Image (cartoon, rainbow, N blue to C red):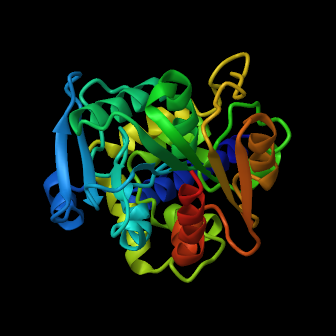
Amino acid sequence: MERIMKTGKWIAITIAILLAIAFVVLYQPDLSREEVDTKYRNHASKFLVLNNGNRIHYRDQGSPDGKTIMLLHGFTSSLHTWEPWVDLLKDTFRIVTLDLPGHGLTGAVENQDYSTTSFSETILGVADALSIDSFVLGGNSMGGGATWQFALAYPERITHMILINATGPWPRQDDRKTKNQNSPFAALEWQWFRRLARHINPRYLVERGLLKAYNNAPVVDRKLVDRYLEMILREGTRDAILKQSAKRRTHVGSTPPSLDVLTQPTLVMWGAMDSLIPVSVGERFVGELPNAELVVYPHLGHVPMEEDASKSVKDIIRFLSLT
């Protein structure tokens, strides 16, 4: 018995040492905000301090006299995801993109509020600061969810909606198993992993996640992985992301809001190969929104605007030219 106890003790000590070594090897400190901001801002980057003290990074590009389109990125992404569309739309449209609280060069915000209400307040604050009374609002994934939620809160401000592989208001019981299996961020729902993730280098997680989200598209190169990784490692952002992840199981409401009050013309765009949110969610959007159409891209994944910018942007131009 004494021998067994000694053996167990040494096994425990060995495991503890190996874990300590692994932590030292994988440990990754934050990157300074100045370092990341210098690398990823450009001539179009501007910063706006809202009434709540939050400092928001945004870009206002394209034709000043064109129809205004405001675009919202997905979870752990940034406004950079829209640059392929901006290049193709800027001669005709005014395009406003922004980094939502907890993301991109906005990063951690003063009031530490990363809720959907905070997203709506941010969209409204940017629109008001730029004197944009009404506009087209579109978003990908989490940004798509922020789009219809803002439209419910401020319907008079939105002329059209664009929902790209968007999160919906409905419980995800039907696709939760598939989503959890495929999403590399599913582990962030585990409290022990969130504590560990705050300190380790997430490159493997980021790269694996991007390959799945982008359906192994060629656009997932070293530059794209570095962009996501360095934005996440920006000082304060990991804490902000982990706070959001802790609430990802919480539904937006016990009773899903009704979307049939949103009568704006809506384009629902979906990559059929999306491993995170199935096409059935896009079909449900079209079924509940009274003035919506669905475009499905057979070979694209969760981020159609980057995976095939030229193909997806043609549908944007067609859609907005109809009304």
- In front here: 244 or 98? 98
Q: Is residue 314 above or below residue 106?
A: below
Left or right of residue 297, residue 234 in this image? left
Q: Residue at coordinates 62% horizontally, 43% vertically from top-left?
A: 265
Q: Residue at coordinates 67% horizontally, 66% vertically from top-left?
A: 301
Left or right of residue 299, residue 209 in this image? left
Instruction: Using the rendered image of the protein, determine whether residue 208 is visible from the camera's viewpoint.
Output: no
What is the quadrant of the N terminus in the image? top right
Q: Residue at coordinates 77% horizontally, 72% vertically from top-left?
A: 298
Q: Position of residue 299 (x, y in %)?
A: 73, 75
Q: Residue at coordinates 52% horizontally, 48% vertically from top-left?
A: 139
Left or right of residue 285, residue 219 in this image? left
Q: Position of residue 229 (x, y in %)?
A: 39, 62
Q: Is residue 284 above or below residue 170?
A: below
- In front here: 187 or 37? 37
User: Which residue is situated farthest in the bottom direction here?
Assistant: 218
Total marks in image: 0
- In front here: 166 or 27? 166
Quadrant location of residue 20?
bottom left
Q: Position of residue 86 (x, y in %)?
A: 38, 66
